[in-house]
Image (spheres, grey):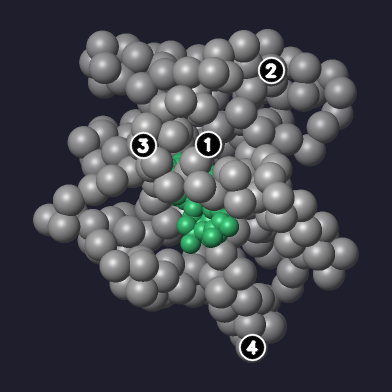
């Protein structure tokens, strides 16, 4: 609540993302829904938007249910779709059917082959397939990636189909590929930066590293890159 108030007071172009497990999903679907709904209602009063992050595949369906359950009453809520999941094209189409706003990312968790593409090439191909569905939808979505090939594919597809630069936004993590963030803004694209917020930054970062140890390598590489 406080962060929505502050964003409004400071007149920032910013919204809030939240993980369902931080809002009580482990305690039960309805506990989480009630907590999230209170936030969405508050955000609505301030003309703001809440994005529900997507976590591991054990909670994909519950997260989508939360989204659909709330979106029917509150349009200022959005969802994340992970391109590595085999089910994602189906989910994208369902979300687009209700005109929901999507952040498309590759997916950050280690998932088994029963539910997720394992090879980078397959994840990238699916990312591009889903990106095209989003850009064709006339709804404002977020394309969340630092992968230059995915960004190039998005720009090329938008250009070829006369989709205006303002019709979508790129999203990147705070501090990662700042060079590319600046370049995109310079070229007239919208770039939204995801900033972890709050006093519990240490457990948050440790969890990110535990989910994907490769992040440690990325982090070190980027420290030297900027
Ligand atoms: C705004 C935003 C929100 C996200 N929300 C979610 C979510 O809700 N659920 C979810 O599962 N995942 C989320 N992710 C993470 C995403 O799924 C990927 O794990 C992550 O973005 C890496 O994939 P990539 O598309 O950047 O491509 P990759 O091919 O993995 O990476 C391309 C390059 O980007 C750089 N890079 C990528 N990630 C990092 C990093 N963490 N640290 C340092 N350098 C890095 C490296 O240089 C790498 O070579 C989010 C990502 C972003 C940008």
Position in image of residue 195 (x %, y %): 66, 33
Q: Can residue 208 be seen in this view?
A: yes
Residue 207 vs residue 86, the one in the foreground: 207
Report, in whole angstroms, how far the alpha carbon at label 1 lies from the one at label 4.
Answer: 29 Å
Placement of the N terminus among the 4 image quadrants: top right
Q: Marks 2 and 1, how far apart in space?
A: 14 Å
- Name the N-terminal-most of marks 2 and 1: 2
Sequence-earlier tag: 1 or 4: 1
Q: In the shown orientation, is residue 5 left or right of residue 49?
A: right
Decide: few, some or many residues near mark 1? Use Cα within 10 Å; few <14, some 14-19, many ≥20: many
Residue at which label 1 appears: 51
Does label 1 point to a residue whose CB lies under 8 Å from ligand 1? Answer: yes
Task: Find the distance from the CA under tag 2 to the CA under tag 4.
Answer: 39 Å
- Which residue corresponds to the image point at 26% horizontal and 11% vertical from the top-left? 27
> Which residue shows up at 49% across the image and 23% down it?
204
Earlier in the chain: of badge 2 and badge 4, it is 2
The residue wearing badge 3 is: 211
Vertical placement of residue 124 versus 103, above or below: below
Of the numbered discs 1 and 3, the one sitting upstream in the chain is: 1
Q: In which quarter of the image is residue 72?
A: top left
Asked whether the residues under the numbered discs 2 and 4 touch, taking CB atoms below 8 Å apart as contact, a structural biologist would say no
Which of the two discs, 1 and 3, sits closer to the camera?
A: 3
Residue that label 2 marks:
3
Is there a contact, CB below 8 Å, between mark 3 and mark 2?
Answer: no
Query: How many residues crowd around disc 3 within 10 Å: few (fewer than 14), some, or many (20 or more)?
Result: some
- The residue to which callout 4 is attached is 160
| Separation (CA) of disc 3 from disc 2 | 26 Å
Residue 204 - label: none
């Amino acid at each position: 609540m406080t962060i929505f108030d502050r964003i409004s007071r400071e007149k920032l172009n910013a919204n809030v993302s939240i993980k369902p497990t931080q809002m009580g999903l482990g305690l039960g679907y309805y506990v989480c829904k009630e907590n999230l709904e209170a936030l969405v209602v508050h955000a609505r009063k301030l003309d703001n938007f809440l994005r529900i992050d997507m976590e591991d595949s054990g909670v994909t369906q519950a997260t989508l249910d939360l989204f659909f359950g709330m979106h029917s009453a509150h349009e200022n809520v959005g969802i994340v779709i992970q391109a590595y999941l085999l089910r994602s094209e189906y989910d994208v189409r369902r979300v687009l059917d209700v005109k929901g706003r999507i952040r498309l990312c590759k997916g950050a968790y280690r998932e088994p082959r029963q539910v997720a593409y394992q090879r980078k090439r397959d994840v990238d191909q699916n990312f591009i397939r889903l990106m095209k569905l989003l850009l064709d939808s006339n709804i404002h979505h977020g394309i969340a990636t630092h992968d230059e090939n995915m960004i190039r594919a998005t720009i090329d597809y938008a250009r070829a189909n006369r989709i205006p630069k303002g019709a979508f936004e790129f999203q990147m993590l705070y501090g990662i590929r700042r060079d590319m963030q600046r370049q995109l803004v310079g070229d007239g694209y919208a770039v939204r930066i995801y900033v972890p917020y709050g006093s519990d930054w240490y457990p948050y970062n440790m969890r990110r590293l535990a989910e994907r140890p490769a992040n440690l390598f990325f982090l070190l590489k980027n420290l030297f890159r900027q």
